[in-house]
């Protein structure tokens, strides 16, 4: 029995140095821009879409509003999550809310937009180049002073292929 007590005492003495193993996970880092990939199923066109948090971007008949975008710190498992509101606007019809909730980059099917024409997937959460201050800095107001600026046109990036008959810029 004394042998058991000695081993128990040794285990309890070794326990405090191992306490660092049960630390809290690091908090998510808020970012100011959501990077999405949009698919138009009719034309089979894939577009990369940047949506600043708090603003609305139009993709086809969809108006996508980003409410939040969080990213795990580098020491954690890679993950980006965005809270999006997606409204479909058709001519001569009332706008219809198609999606409102969190989308996750690592599990796109977990919380997906169910739409017959469009697919949206979160790729990443980033800080935009025009906002070097980083997270927590509010997006600038529109030029006319509105807090809720009008939706902007699609901010999709296209491949950097030069147009026919032109030469690519030198770098």
Image (cartoon, rainbow, N blue to C red):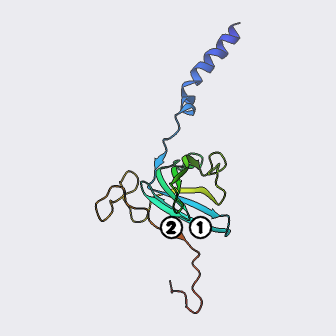
Locate the N terminus by quadrant: top right
The outermost residue toward the left is: 145
Q: What element carries label 2?
A: loop
Q: Nearer the viewer, residue 95 or 5?
A: 95
Instruction: Find disc 1 in the rendering and name its residue.
Output: 47
* As drawn, 2 above or below 102: above
Circle number at residue 127: none
Q: Residues within 10 Å of mark 2 (few under 14, many from 20)?
A: some
Left or right: residue 31 compared with residue 77: left
Q: How crowded is mark 1: few (under 14 residues within 10 Å), some or many (20 or more)?
A: some
Q: Nearer the viewer, residue 93 or 54?
A: 93
Instruction: Find disc 2 in the rendering and name its residue.
Output: 154
The outermost residue toward the bottom is: 165
> In which image quadrant can residue 4 be found?
top right
Query: Does the residue at mark 1 contact the one at mark 2 (Cβ under 8 Å)?
Result: yes
Q: Is mark 1 on a helix, strand or loop?
A: strand
Percent across and percent down for residue 98 are: 57, 51
Left or right: residue 113 compared with residue 134: right
> In which image quadrant can residue 48 be found?
bottom right
Name the front one of labels 1 and 2.
2
> Does label 1 or label 2 sit earlier along the sequence?
1
What residue is at 54 percent from the left and 25 percent from the top? Answer: 16
Left or right: residue 72 compared with residue 11: left
What residue is at 56 percent from the left and 31 percent from the top? Answer: 22
What residue is at 30 percent from the left and 65 percent from the top? Answer: 143
Percent across and percent down for residue 13 are: 57, 21
């Amino acid at each position: 029995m004394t042998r058991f007590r000695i081993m128990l005492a040794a285990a309890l003495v070794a326990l405090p140095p191992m306490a660092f193993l049960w630390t809290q996970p690091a908090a998510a880092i808020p970012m100011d821009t959501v990077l999405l990939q949009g698919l138009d199923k009719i034309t089979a066109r894939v577009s990369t879409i940047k949506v600043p948090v708090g603003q609305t971007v139009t993709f086809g008949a969809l108006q996508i509003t980003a409410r939040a975008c969080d990213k795990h710190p580098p020491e954690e498992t890679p993950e980006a999550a965005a809270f999006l509101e997606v409204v479909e606007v058709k001519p001569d019809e009332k706008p219809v809310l198609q999606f409102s909730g969190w989308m996750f980059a690592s599990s796109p099917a977990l919380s997906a937009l169910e739409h017959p024409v469009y697919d949206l997937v979160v790729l990443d959460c980033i800080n935009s180049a025009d906002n070097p201050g980083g997270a927590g800095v509010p997006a600038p107001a529109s030029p006319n002073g509105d807090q809720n600026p009008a939706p902007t046109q699609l901010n999709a990036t296209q491949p950097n292929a030069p147009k026919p008959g032109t030469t690519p810029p030198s770098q």
